[in-house]
Image (spheres, rainbow, N blue to C red):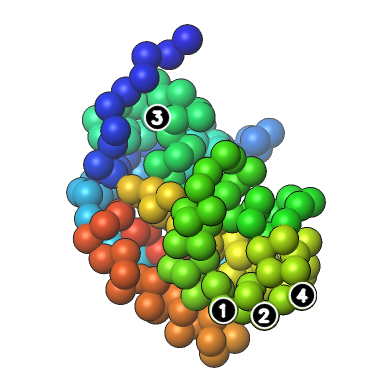
Amino acid sequence: MKLALPEPTGHLLLENVTALAPGGPKPVLRGISINIPPGSAVALVGPSAAGKSSLARVLTGIWPAVSGTVRFDGADLAHWNPEDIGKHIGYLPQDIELFSGTIAENIARFSQCRDEQIIEAAGLAGVHDMIQKMPEGYNTQIGDGGQRQRIGLARALFGLPCVIVLDEPNSNLDGAGEEALVDAFAELKNKSVLLLLLRTR
């Protein structure tokens, strides 16, 4: 069993990281070094297939680095218990995978928590009012389309993690969703490391 590390502040450090896609023959990232201090907001902008989503997967521990080190508050990401580190990283991927269950369960990542935490995350993502208008409210089963994008954002913000990685968070959003996203950024300022991965138009 791995030692439980102290509560992190969100300092991200990549040291000469090279990574492969699972089963891939060639590196998708090579020699990447980034130092992001706590409370920062950073946007990485580039075209499709530039490696932004690959970087997000490495930063969140979904893909391991084949060389170099990803450090979270100075500790190698591999030294953290997956259950512990998961609470401190919020991630909104491009292709959102929500699970069979209610909106509340998905926002809470199917964890045991207080109802207030779910409502707080939904409020930050600007979806509380939208959810309240649904026939079953937070007990509504997950649907499709832009709703998934906004519920996925609420899930990423759940528990106010100290690192939040958003991969093209404005895709599939309507005007209200875009406005809620901007409001969420303002609310999170100086509370979390905010890493935005955006595609050039």
Residue, disc 1? 129
Looking at the rendered structure, which numbered label has been put on residue 135?
4
Image point (63%, 75%), residue name: 132
The secondary element bearing badge 3 is classed as helix
Measured along the vertical axis of the image, is residue 62 above or below residue 66? below
For label 4, count other residues whose C-alpha is less than 10 Å away and answer few (under 14), some (14-19) or many (20+). Answer: few
Q: Is residue 70 left or right of residue 110?
A: left
Residue, disc 3? 77
The secondary element bearing badge 2 is classed as loop
Total marks in image: 4
- The kind of residue on which mark 2 rests is Lys
User: Does label 4 or label 3 sit earlier along the sequence?
Assistant: 3
- The kind of residue on which mark 1 rests is Asp
- For the residues labelled 4 and 3, the Cα–Cα distance comes to 42 Å
The answer to whether marks 2 and 3 mark residues whose Cβ atoms lie closer than 8 Å is no
Q: Quadrant of residue 185?
A: bottom left
- The kind of residue on which mark 4 rests is Pro
Q: Nearer the viewer, residue 166 or 152?
A: 152
The answer to whether marks 2 and 4 mark residues whose Cβ atoms lie closer than 8 Å is no
The answer to whether marks 4 and 3 mark residues whose Cβ atoms lie closer than 8 Å is no
Residue, disc 2? 133
* Residue 172 visible here: no
Q: Is residue 75 left or right of residue 97?
A: left
The answer to whether marks 1 and 3 mark residues whose Cβ atoms lie closer than 8 Å is no
User: Does label 4 or label 1 sit earlier along the sequence?
Assistant: 1
Q: Please provide percent x and percent y for residue 127.
A: 56, 73
